[in-house]
Image (cartoon, rainbow, N blue to C red):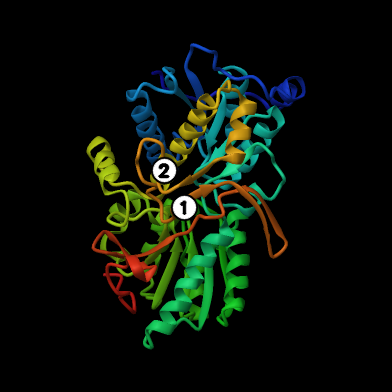
Amino acid sequence: MRKKVVSLLLVACMTGGLLAGCSGAGGGGGSDSDGNIVIGAVYPMTGDLADSGKTMQQGIDMAVEEINEEGGIDGREIEVIYGDSQGDSAKGMTEAERLITQENVDMLIGCYQSGVTVTVAQIAEQYQVPMITANATSDELTSNGYEYFFRLAPTNMMFVRDMIQYLTEEKEKNPDFKADSIAVFADNSEVGQQTVEWAEYWANENGIDYLGDITYTSGAADLSSEVLELKSMNPDVVVADCYVSDAILFTNTLQEQGYKPPVVICKGNGFTESAYLESVGNHANGIIVATEFVVGTKGDDINAKYKEKYGEDFNGHSAEAYTTAWVVIDALKNIVDGGGEISRESIQQELKEIKIEGQFSNGNEIILPYDTIAFEEDEFNGTPYLNQNLNATLTVTQIEDGVYVPIWPYDIAQADVVYPATYE
């Protein structure tokens, strides 16, 4: 099986020309009745987010190797061709077009950052190529009415919903736990600002005082003034949403300024990457992280296989990528088992209809916190959702000595919350 990591730089006018000339190719793709089934995947393979891209590639590759070792789909292997977004929307768009028009992929998976994913989703819709994201959380992605775009991951609304639900239940359970006010620390991207908006919404819904937000530009070299401003707000709880380099800088700046918020609760994002713990060490102790996978809660055998292969446990991102690949595999199996031909159009139709409960066709359980995967339509607080996995939920963990210890939902909790956080 070939795997490619390619960066092809084209000027914007060439991209526009391709779009004008090649739209509406819904029935095409790289498959023929005898050849490989070709999937394109766009992730940051180089640049600041390369470590994140690597973990998601590992998740996809392991799933694809599993099905190919079983004989593939009706004797045909799955082939994954990677495109390198470098964490940049324009480069992600160029790579998606290359995969569609030159590599003739049957579908796309990607892209980690919501900003890149939004751009690539537009390309997929233009060319009528089915696309599924394992990780991107922007509410916009499934609210644009795109018929060819699907999302496994929770939306921002769902992420913040579960985080605030945990705070509310912990307050009721533990009289010493104080969560009467919150402030948000997030970047000024679309996703960061959605985190701000949903934090205010869910705080108000749950009787929590919303004090405001501190925003910054991702990749900033210094966060001292932002953390000082956050400190002056004196919230009971800080809600944080950061990519990995920002998460490292935020945590280290807390230490430098001697600021120890009683509770910091984070969207998984950069706080689940191995580079984060390697960089901040025990300064992460007590930080609460909402994530999509926790060692010891589900999928122990699958995680052990992943760790043996790659030398690390699944994190939320790699677990979602692995799961997404298996959703695609089962969709392809269903098409063939139903007597159909694999094409972009048949994959899109099957993803709209698929429902996976408990386990995949190879017997492996769904390793994420929920047991059902289906892409459905809904509306919440004025935001429509199409082709969204509405069953997605999170597990809330607390970092202690480099381990993400599950503390909510309480039926899977392995410890009580340490309050206040120690950061040491």
Residue 78 lies left or right of residue 89; in this view the side is: left
Point out residue 233 in the picture as x, y percentages from the top left corner: 52, 79
Q: Which mark is residue 26?
A: none
Q: Which residue is mark 2?
A: 52
Residue 400 lies left or right of residue 166; in this view the side is: left
| Vertical relation: 157 (above or below) 108 | below
Dot 2 lies on which element?
helix
The quadrant holding residue 369 is bottom left
Q: Which residue is mark 1?
A: 243
Q: Nearer the viewer, residue 350 or 221?
A: 350
Type of the residue with mark 2: Ser
Looking at this view, name the residue that lies furthest to the front.
Answer: 338
Tell me the residue at 67%/32% (across/down). 123
Point out residue 13 in the picture as x, y percentages from the top left corner: 73, 25
Dot 1 lies on which element?
loop
Tell me the residue at 41%/36% (across/down). 361
Point out residue 72 in the picture as x, y percentages from the top left corner: 40, 22
Q: Are marks 1 and 2 in contact (CB under 8 Å)?
A: yes
Answer with mark 1 or mark 2, whichever residue precedes in sequence. Answer: 2
